[in-house]
Structures are given as structure tokens and as C-alpha cells.
Image (cartoon, rainbow, N blue to C red):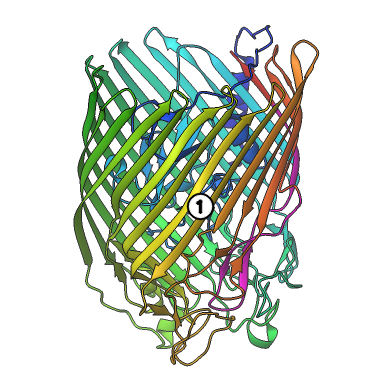
Amino acid sequence: MKSYKLATIALCVATALQANTAIAQETAEKEAGLEKITVTAQKRVQSIQDVPISIATLSGEKFESIFSGGDDILALAVRVPGLYAESSNGRVAPRFYIRGLGNTDFDLAASQPVSIIMDDVVKENVILKSFPLFDVQQVEVIRGPQGTLFGRNTTAGIIKFDSVKPTEDFDAYGKVSLATYGTVNIEGAVGGGLSDNLAGRFSFLSQQRDDYIDNAFSGEDDAIGGYDELAWRGQLLFTPTDDLDVLLNVHGRDLEGTASIFRANIFTKGSNKLNENYDRETVYYDANLLGNGFDNNPQAYENFGYSVKVDYDFGDLTFTSITANEEAEGNSLGDIDGGSGSGATSNPGFIPFTAVTQDNMDDLEQFTQEFRLASNYKDAFNWQVGAFYYDSSFNVTSIDGFFGATTVFHDNQTWAVFGQGTYDVSDKLTITGGLRYTDDEKSLRVGDQNVDGFALVIGAASVQDYDPINVDDGQVGYELSANYKLDENTSLFARYANGFRAQSIQGRDVAFEGSPSVAEAETINSVEFGFKSDLLENSLRLNAALFYYTVDDMQFSAIGGGANNIALINADQGTAYGFEVDATYVVNDNLLLTAGYSFNKTKIEDNSLSLFPCGASVDFGPNCTVTDQMTSDNRALIDGNPFPQAPETILNLTARYSFPVGDDGEMFAYTDWAFQGKTNLYLYESVEFQTDNNFEAGLRVGYENFAHNYTVALFVRNLTDEDNVKGAIDFNNLTGIVNEPRVVGIEGKISFF
């Protein structure tokens, strides 16, 4: 496999760099002024300033700098106001949050209210959401419910990724970076016309990092922390006539690496500060589920998919069809107690009992089909209607060191019909309205249970007989918005949106002698007001939005307690209010500044909802300092608490300064800073499991030559080497998950046109 990857990379690089191209010889002209940004948030190409939705975009240098150190999709966290992401599953199964709405459920079947759309295809399963990012044209973060055009499970919003598409014009690039911890990133693409009516593009990404964390229990140096990932994408654009476009997208990924690094007892009871047990480059792991020694949290996943998009232009109407299929499988193991041994022999700190789990996903298949018909009238009224179908199935085998292996099977079918209309009341006022009906059906079936489990052998567990669970729900979602242009540079908008997250089934507790749980569908009603403006003679862009929403029957995952159970629950209601501001300022030809800020106040409203916190049970109190009111049976009342993993504030700052060097180049310095305010990690509140004032910064300094289209740069990610807590495991001891270390490297990129 290693030799195959290297051969593939070498071939791609050779193709890109040896192509017969004409290199541009004239210096690129840089004009002061704001870049014109177009988005497809309403499934039409529109100026971001004309869309009555709060949207932020990432592209170009701002996007590339974030990922220069080898980070995965989680690096988007806190890089856009209102957007957060985290995971307890390493480089797979990310969990996204917009305006505080998300889902902390670590199960591979978990649904999320943030939808990931890649090249017009929804990636519903958490494994599919983690597909690596490369050769990206633009990222759109679309805040607020998007149920009319994009369907259920978009109550928080959408993150939309668009890859660079094939064109008839030749272009290619190759990019290589070398960094600390043996980090090597190689990225490239080549595209252009293949015949009169056919264009193609092939792009790839290889990311590698050496293991750099020692396992002090086994005595193995550099035992964990690395990864080896290869992802690729091939596209063909067939245009037999001026009216017909057919785009084929085939893609895949292969990941071998390390799951999340759990670190035992890195908090002292009564404090959320990292203590002396924390050492970024040392862990104590004794997990051995795979039978081959100390497994050191291995992770491996494969994914393959394709899509076919057909656009036919009838003149006044455009018909669009998008057919897509995704397949994935893999496994991940976690020494979730974060240390070794138990009782008096545990390390580091006191660990009551050992805990190790492994999840294997097999036979994940997702099929989607969308048909859409949209008008292209030059009149005041335009519309689009469509239908959508979704079908997925997979099974997950959970393996526990005590209970053994248990397999559950998941199936999900969804269909929907939708329509949206836009009417220009006048030159200044535009009204948009939409409706969507969605029917969603899920089922869960339990297969083998407690296979080869020690608990079954000694009589501490028994094989249970669970009837299949089937849930079905159909709902109508709708929205109404207005956009009013004060002048050609400033507009006001208002938007009301209703949507729902479909019912969920959680079957992971079956592996631990528990019962499956079901959460009913949640419904959101959201109102927002905002303005978008280009000011100071097109040098300052200032966009802002103020929002308020309520979620009825809000779905949460109650995770933890003494047995680390995970059960789906519905709160009566969740509410939130806040705002976000995005600003870009072109100071002059040499200096560009951007800033973004979001405030988000969330609240759980259910005066009877309670759960077992941090290791608590009926017989034992919590092992952390719970600040909520407690019941007599050691349950925490969570009414009034903020949503979990919902940063109250997010602040982003970037600055780029450049100056000419000779007639055809420039030196530049680019820095980016991201700050994360108070964040509660769980549904309950405690002293230990909350963070505040986390931040990370990056710096990139280099030289760009416009005549020969190459760039050389030095970069640093996590510039100040911050140790930021990103997550925790609370049922056994005070275990935490921290961010990636500082990475320093050099990068070179060359482009051909």
C-alpha cells in the first residue's frame, strides 16, 4: 500500500510539472478594492451581497494557510464567526456546530444539524463528512436553517465545499511542504481540454506525519500521533452542445493513522487547568483489543464515491439532475481511560477501571438523487422546484474489552419535494419564499451481541433479544425573506425560517447491556435581521446579522455517568440569540485586514431534565465538581445550562502585508488569529469541563513570483504552542483531549497556465 501511494503521488507530480505549458511572463496586476464573491447558497450563482442569508466564505490564501500544517477538516473550527468543530474520533467523524447548534454524540450513526455539502452532494454520515479538503475553489458557511432547498438536518446551517472544476483552458499546480514531526504534505492538480467537447481535471492530496508521542507504559518511543492519508479526485466535463453539461466526479481516500489521543487525569478536581500529569508527547496506554501488542489507538478508513451532475439549458428553464453514491468502511480503537492499569497500579493518577473500545464500520452505502427545474426569466419573478431521494445503510460493530463485540444495523430512507420563488417587488425590494415536504424513515436492527465477551463467559452479561426499531416522520419546512437595497452598496435583509432535524436512533448502548434509545424530531423557528455593505469607495466590506431561534423537542445526547452510557433525549426547548459580524478592509495596495466576531447565548429550557454527570450513579456521586443543582440520586438538573460545545464568543483576525521585489515579485507576511470564548463541554456544568480564552495563531512569510507563478514560504501553525482543551471523557477519570502542537515548516508551490 505504501509503495502504491508513493507511485501514485510521483505520477501526479510528474504530470503536473512536466506538462507542456506557456508560463505567463507578465506581472499580475493587483488592484486595490474588494473581491467580488459569488455563492450558491440558494442553488443559483449570486453575489454574496445580494443573498438574504448570513454567509461567510473561505478561499485562496486564507483557506490554504489554515491547512498548511497538515490539519484535517477540524481546522475550520473558530475560523469563521459562529462556526465550531471538534471530535473524539481523530481525523474521522467530525462534529460541527453553527450558532451553538450541533451534536456531541460520538456514535458513528449520529445525526447532526450542520449539513456538509461537497460538490453539490450531501455527506450525511459522520465518516463521509471528514473527506479531506484539497483543490478547493471556495467554502461557504451558511448560517441558520436551510431546510427549504437542502432538507432536514440543516437546522443549524450548511458548510458547502466546491472543488475547482474542469475547463477547456489548461492549468496545473504542485505544492509540497515539509514540517516538524516528519510532516509532509503534497498536493497537486492538472486539468484542461481533452477533446473538442471534453475537459478533465485530476487532483490529489497526500498527508503524512510521523508518530511523535511516546507510550511510557510499553516503553515505546514515537508510538502514536502520526497519520498517512491519500485522497484524490477525478472529474470529466462533457459538453456535447452549448445547452448540455455533464460533470462526472469520482473520488476516494485511504487513511491510516491515530485516533484521538485521550489523556488521563490531566485536570485536578476543582480546576480546569492542565496539571502535571499532562505531557503533550507522552501517554500511558495498555489497550490490547486487536491481540497484537499495545495497539496505541490505531485508525484506518477507506472511502470511495462518485457523482454525475447534468445541467440542460432550455433557455427560460434549466433542468438539473445530481446522482451520487458513497461507500466507506474502517475501524478506530480508543484507550478511552487515557492511561494504564487500574486502582493502585494505574498511571497517570487514579483510574478506577480500564476502558477500551473499538468501532468497526462496514458496508456504508449512501445513494442520493436530486432533480431540479429552475427558471431563468428576465422578469420580476423566478422560481425553482425539485425532488430529492436519499437511501443509506451501514452496520457498526462495537467491541468492548469486557462485554465483547456487538453489531447493529442502520437503515435510513428520505424523500422530499420542494419549491422556492423570488419576486422583485421593485428595484430595491426582493421577496423570497420556499416550502419543502420531507418524509424520513429510520430503522435499527441488532445482530450479534456480546460475541466472545468475558462478561458473557462469567455470567455478568447475557444475550438480549431486541425487536427491530422503526421510526417515521414527515414534516413541512418553510422560509420567507426580504432583501432591501438602500443603495447600490448597502442592503438590509430579514429572514424567517422553519426546519427540522429528523428523529434519531441510538443503538450503541446495546453493546453494554443497555437498550436502544430514540429521540423524536426537533423543530426550529429562526428569525434574523442583517445588513450587507461595501463602503469607503469599495475598500471596506461590513456584513452583520442578528438572530434568535427556538428549538422545540431539542435532541441531545446524554453521555457519561458511571457506565459511560449514551442515550438520546429530548429537551422541551432550546433557545439562543446572538449576532455575527464579518469585515474585510483593503487598507491600500499592500495591506489587507479581515475580522470577524460572533456572540452566541444558548439555553436549555426543561425544568425536569436530569442526567448522571461525570462518573456518577445512584450509588456514587460525581468525580468532578458539578455546579448544577443535584437530585438525591446524584443526577444533575440541566435546565438553564448552555448547549454543549457552543462557544459563547468567537473572534477571528487576519492581516496580510506585502511589498514589491523587483518587477515581477513580492515579499509577503500573512498572520491569522482565532479566539474561542467560554465553552461548556457537556450538558451539565462543572468546574473541570469548561474552557475559556482558547486561541491559536498562524504565520506565513514568503516570496511570490508573478512572472513564473511560484511561491516559497515559511509557515508556523499554532504559533504560540498553545495547549487548548478540545474535549474530555468524564465517566472514569478526568480525561482530556487537546489540540495539535506547534508545527513549523516550509512550503513551495508552482502553477502552470
Q: Quadrant of residue 406?
A: bottom left
Residue 695, image x and y in percent? 67, 53
Q: Amino acid at mark 1?
A: Val
For the residue pair 202 and 703, the one nearer the viewer reads as 703
Label 1 Cα crowd, 10 Å radius (few <14 / some 14-19 / many 20+): many
Q: Residue at x 48, y 83 (%)?
A: 629
Quarter of the image for residue 186 reads: top right
Q: Position of residue 204 (x, y in %)?
A: 54, 31
Quadrant in the picture for the N terminus: top right
Question: Which residue is pictured at 69% across the width and 84% down the height?
Answer: 345
Where does the image place residue 659, in percent across and percent down from the top left? 77, 22
Magenta stretch contains residue 700: no
Residue where numbered disc 1 is placed: 92
| In this picture, residue 568 sits left or right of residue 745 | left
Residue 618 x/y as whole percent: 44, 90
Looking at this rendering, what residue extends furthest in the front direction? 486
Q: Is residue 739 above or below residue 62?
A: below
Is residue 726 covered in magenta?
A: yes
Residue at left 53%, top 43%? 581
Location of residue 473 by image quarter: bottom left
Asked if residue 128 shows in the view, the reply is: yes
Q: Quadrant of the C terminus?
A: top right
Q: Which residues are magenta?
A: 720-748
* 397 lies above or below 199: below
